[in-house]
Image (spheres, helix red, strand yellow):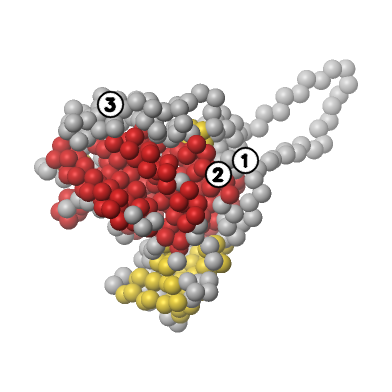
Amino acid sequence: RSGRYLRLRIRTQEEPLTVERLGILTRHYPFVSENRWASSDAAWNQIQPLLHHGLKMNAHEIWVDCPYYEQMMYVGDTRLHMLNNYVAYRDDRLSRRGLELFDWSRRGCEHGLVAERYPSYRRQESATYAMIWVWMVRDYMLWRDDPAFVRSRLTGVRQMMEGLLSLFASDGRLHELPGWSFIDWVADWQGGCGPGVREGDSSLVNLHAVLTFQAAAEIEAVLGEAELAARWERKAASLMSKVIARYWDESEGYVRDTVSDSLKSEQAQVLALLTGLLTKSQESRALEFLVTHRADVPCSIYFSHYLLETYARYGQVSNFAASLERWKQLPELGFVALPERHEPTRSDCHAWGAHPIFHTYASMAGIRPVEAGFKTVELRPLPGLLEWFSLEMPHPQGTIHFKADGLDGDPTFHVKLPPGVQGRLLWKNQRHDFEEEFSSA
């Protein structure tokens, strides 16, 4: 229960004992914070040190799932660690090491998939988590200017993608898969697998594959392989059409988890919306289903990263803000690190729960790379979420400075980017393109 409770057990003999001082020695990777955040939301400002502390406690010679029970990397969890890394710290050696080690972990799998967790004594398979490794390579390509490293992972990406294709059935969908096809850790699901996952009839598994095809297409396009990029785009579109044909509920306007269970999940709507491949009508109805909380199964702390991604992409400010309230409550509940689940929980210091670090910069302030290498910076703040904010954030070429005021009315902006970096500020229906510096004051 690291990070929340401390028990001191003392057995005295003949002599009395007085405890005069108690100290705790902590060890973690020596990250130097190169980000700064201040805003009109005092509670959100207050939570930032806790989030960073939780992340650092899981940074050693590799990112670890938690510093006590599971001192190893899980793919899905590590992706969130890495996204936090990119917005908070210039030093990305742990993230590059993670990408490399997961690439190595493909050895020993007949399908060439990365291991669900690594390094570990026993190999554990998970096709869903293996797919997320491709998303991680794409993330690094966008947030860091290191094309040589991305290219060094390209053989692994291609071999894994071909192995993934070998798992598809004759009807063009994924059915039963080897290992543990983990989706999300929620109470109503068996072992983190949604309805139909183990049985081989799941929209969630197939939506993971659609997103993986899209990530592979982006990687190939950037590295100059237009034919391969087009191939993965076709496969993404083809698989999405099969997902909609089987799992779309036209009467209620949502994506079913499976055809044989009536449970409705937020997770299925989130993944479908993030593909960007729903029709306009389907997109509108699935989003309404999500934001009006008609689902039976909510996202956990882990999967709420993707929920926040969806809310940010579609400008759902009130839902985005409401989702952050549970993090704001952590200090008064006694937490100094991130729990695995919302209360009631044990506190195992799971750093993937610190993903609001990423969303502070990438969603609230709206700072995202437009192209590989972060050569063009997009700034799209969520309107009305805050009255003002001021930040500094590391960039491959230097530091991003961004100040915004009057966001609840007539806003003013000031942006300073590293030399030679292009910028694009979007606010409601206005777009301002600039190089290095922009001020609306």
**SS class, disc 2:** helix
Query: Could you classify mark 1 by the number of other residues whose Cα lies within 10 Å: few (under 14), some (14-19), or many (20 or more)?
Result: few
Looking at this view, name the residue that lies furthest to the bottom.
441
Q: Residue shown at 52%/63% (left/top)?
A: 395
| Mark 2 or 3, closer to the camera | 2
**Disc 1 vs disc 2: Cβ atoms closer than 8 Å?**
yes
Query: Could you classify mark 3 by the number of other residues whose Cα lies within 10 Å: few (under 14), some (14-19), or many (20 or more)?
Result: some
Q: Look at mark 2 in the image and give the residue it sits on.
A: 97
Q: Residue shown at 40%/34% (left/top)?
A: 113
Disc with the residue nearer the chain's start (1 vs 3)? 1
Question: Seen in the image, is 403 located left or right of residue 173?
Answer: right
Residue 86 pos. (x, y %): 51, 55
Residue 211 pos. (x, y %): 31, 46
Tell me which amino acid carries mark 2. Answer: Arg
Toward the viewer: 404 or 71? 71
As drawn, 368 above or below 135: below
**SS class, disc 3:** loop
As drawn, 441 above or below 330: below
Q: CA distance from mark 1 to mark 2?
A: 9 Å
Q: Look at mark 1 in the image and give the residue it sits on.
A: 61
Q: Look at mark 3 in the image and give the residue it sits on.
A: 176
Residue 319 pos. (x, y %): 34, 53
Q: Residue shown at 48%/34% (left/top)?
A: 105
Tell me which amino acid carries mark 1. Answer: Glu
Query: Could you classify mark 2 by the number of other residues whose Cα lies within 10 Å: few (under 14), some (14-19), or many (20 or more)?
Result: some
Q: Residue shown at 45%/34% (left/top)?
A: 106
Disc with the residue nearer the chain's start (2 vs 3)? 2
